[in-house]
Amino acid sequence: MSRSVLILQQINENRNKMKPGKQKSKKGKKENVISVGNAGLASKHGFYLETAWILSLLFEKKAKNVLKIIEADPKTAGYSFEQSINRIKHHHQSGHVRQLTEFLAPALIDEMRTWKNSRNSMLRDMTTIHVSRQRMERLASEGISLYKRWNKSLKIVKNGMKNPGSTTYNPINNPVDEE
């Protein structure tokens, strides 16, 4: 037998010897889950490009989740990040979804598109010129700041859609957030 097979057998035997109360449940545990914690960890250790990609995936996921609620259409899962932003902007401008117009600033949607375009521009530049560490760090830190505002707004929009009469907090006009 190979050495790796022997090691795996020893690990399995040791697991079986553990007391039942000491075993950790794998139920509900997901592998390779992209999370804000991963982005923070990547940023903390100086992996700014990875931070930007993780944030991008989170932005897209949140946008698609809101669109699923708004449109109730299975096609939303197939939208690209740009299409998701465009659909949210369309719904915002049309005014059909009151919570979207109330709790999501149009400037935030435009900032999201600008950040995405900056990310794409930086990646194109990486193939032809040297991209400085400061540029990658700036993109990551702008993404983290934008994520906080984007996440906060979309949570309020989703809560407002689930409970239409209960939402009284308007984060757009809150002077504390402006500082």
Image (cartoon, rainbow, N blue to C red):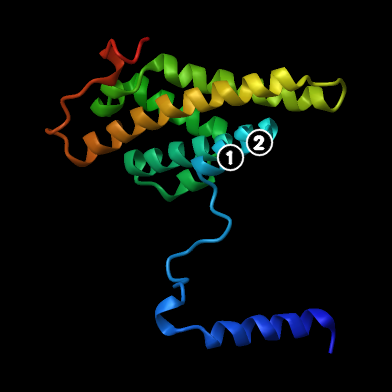
Residue shown at 47%/64% (left/top)?
29
Q: Nearer the viewer, residue 164 or 151?
A: 151
Residue shown at 50%/40% (left/top)?
36
Which residue is denoted by mark 1 in the rendering?
Answer: 41
Work out whether 67 lies above or below 34.
above
The location of residue 88, given as percent across then percent down, is: 42, 29
Residue shown at 49%/47% (left/top)?
77
Outermost residue, left side: 165
Which residue is denoted by mark 2 in the rendering?
Answer: 45
Q: Nearer the viewer, residue 121 or 51?
A: 51
Q: Amino acid at mark 1?
A: Leu
Which of the 4 image quadrants contains residue 94? top left
Work out whether 2 lies above or below 142.
below
Which of the 4 image quadrants contains residue 50? top right
Neighbor class of circle 2 (other Cα within 10 Å; few <14, some 14-19, many 20+) is few
Neighbor class of circle 1 (other Cα within 10 Å; few <14, some 14-19, many 20+) is some
Residue shown at 53%/46% (left/top)?
78
Q: Could you say which disc has been placed on residue 15 in the image?
A: none
Q: Nearer the viewer, residue 178 or 65?
A: 178
Query: Is there a contact, CB below 8 Å, between mark 1 and mark 2?
Result: yes
**Disc 2 on helix, strand or loop?**
loop
Question: In which quadrant will I find the N terminus?
Answer: bottom right
Q: Amino acid at mark 2?
A: His
35 sits left or right of 90 in the view: right
Which of the 4 image quadrants contains residue 44? top right
